[in-house]
Image (tube, rainbow, N blue to C red):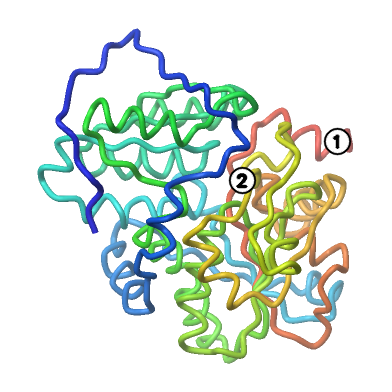
Amino acid sequence: MSNLLYERRPMPDNHTWRTATAKNDMIGPTDALETMPLPTAADVRAAAARLTGWAANTPLLRNSLLDAATGATVLLKTETLQRTGSFKFRGAFNRLAQLSPHERRAGVVAWSSGNHAQGVAAAAALLGIAATIVMPADAPRLKVERTRALGAKVIPYDRVREDREQIGRTIAAETGAVVVPPYDDPHVIAGQGTVGLEAMAQAAAMGVSIDDILIPASGGGLTAGIAVAVKSERPETRLFTVEPVGYDDHRRSWLSSARERNSSLAPALCDALLAATPGALTWRINRRVLSGGYAVTDSEVRTAMAFGFEVLKLVIEPSGAAALAALLAGHHAATGRVVVVVLSGGNVDGNIFAAVLNGA
C-alpha cells in the first residue's frame, strides 16, 4: 500500500517547519483511516519472514522470584534487547522494506518521541534510504543523539504548541518523502505484531499457553499488532493496555467505547506513552479485542524499573516498564495464570536511570 507521492524539491538545511495547528486538534487523516483495510494474521507472518535476519528474535524470560511475587507464571518479552532497544524497529523495517525504488529515492519522514525515530532511522540506514524525523524538543537526549547517529535528520518541535503530524506531512508534501506513521499504518502494525507471533511460539516451546498479555500503549500499534497475531491462534487470550496515569486514553476509551483524548500535554516520566488519543486505525482493531486497561503511577514505574535491574538484570526505560509496573502493583489479577509482560523498550537516559535506582 503506497503513500501519495509528491514531486520532490530540495529541502534547504536552514528551513524550519512550523504549523499554527493546535496540538489538541484531531490527529491525522481519520476519514481514510476509517476505511483502510486492516492488517491480517497473514500480514504478520509475512512481516516475520521479511524481518528474518534483520530483527532479533527477543527472549521470552521467566524468573522464579517474579512468579513467587505474583502467584503467576510470568513470561517477559524482552524487546529491550531488540535492535535500537525497542520493538519499534520491527514495524519501521517492515514498512520501509516494502517501498518501491521510486519511494526509496524520495526518502521517508516520521514523527516520534524517540523509539520510532530510532527504528525508522536504523531501518532507513540499512536499506539506504534518507530519513527525516520530527521529534519533540524535550525528547530524551539519548534518543535524539542515537537517531542522529543513525544518519537521520532531526527536526525539533514544541509538543504543546505544535502538531508533529502536520509538520511531518508538510515536509512530505514539500519534498516528496514517504510518511512512516508511528502506529496508524497497516504495515507498521503487522511488523509490531511479530512480537506476539514470537511470544506464542516461545510459550508453546515452554509447554504453556498464554492467558493474558500486558502491553504498554501509546498510539496502540503494538497492541493492535499483537492482537492480530495472537487472537487468530488463541482467541481466549486476554489483552490489556497499560499507560501512565493522566495519559490512559486507551483505558478510558475501552470503558466508553469511543476514542477518548488526554487533557494533559505536559512531559512525563513515560515519555514514549504520551499519545493524545488512540490511533484511528489501531482503535478499529483494539476496541474489539481488549479486555481492559490499567493506569500506573510514576512511583509504580520506578519500582518496576528498579526490580528489572536488581532482580531481572535488565535495563528498562520508564515506558517499557509500564506493563511490569501494573503487574507488580497488583492491578492485574494474575494468580494462577500465564501472563506475558511486554518490556517494550530499554532506551533510558543514564541520569534518569541512576536517579530511579538511587530512589530519587
How packed mark 1 is, by other alpha carbons closer than 10 Å (few <14, some 14-19, many 20 or more), is few
Q: Name the residue under label 1.
A: 358
Amino acid carrying mark 1 in the image: Asn
Q: Which residue is drawn at 88% across and 68% down?
A: 330
Could you tell whether 12 is left or right of 283 in the image?
left
Q: Position of residue 17 (x, y in %)?
A: 41, 19
- State how far apart marks 1 and 2 are (Cα): 29 Å
Could you tell whether 7 is left or right of 279 in the image?
left
Q: Which residue is drawn at 72% across and 46% down?
A: 262
Amino acid carrying mark 2 in the image: Ala
- Which is nearer the N-term, disc 1 or disc 2? 2
Q: What element carries label 2?
A: loop
Q: Residue furthest left?
A: 101
Q: Residue at x 65, y 27 (%)?
A: 160
Give the label on residue 275, or none: 2
Q: Which of 16 and 267 is in front in this view?
A: 16
Q: What is the quadrant of residue 213 in the picture?
A: bottom right
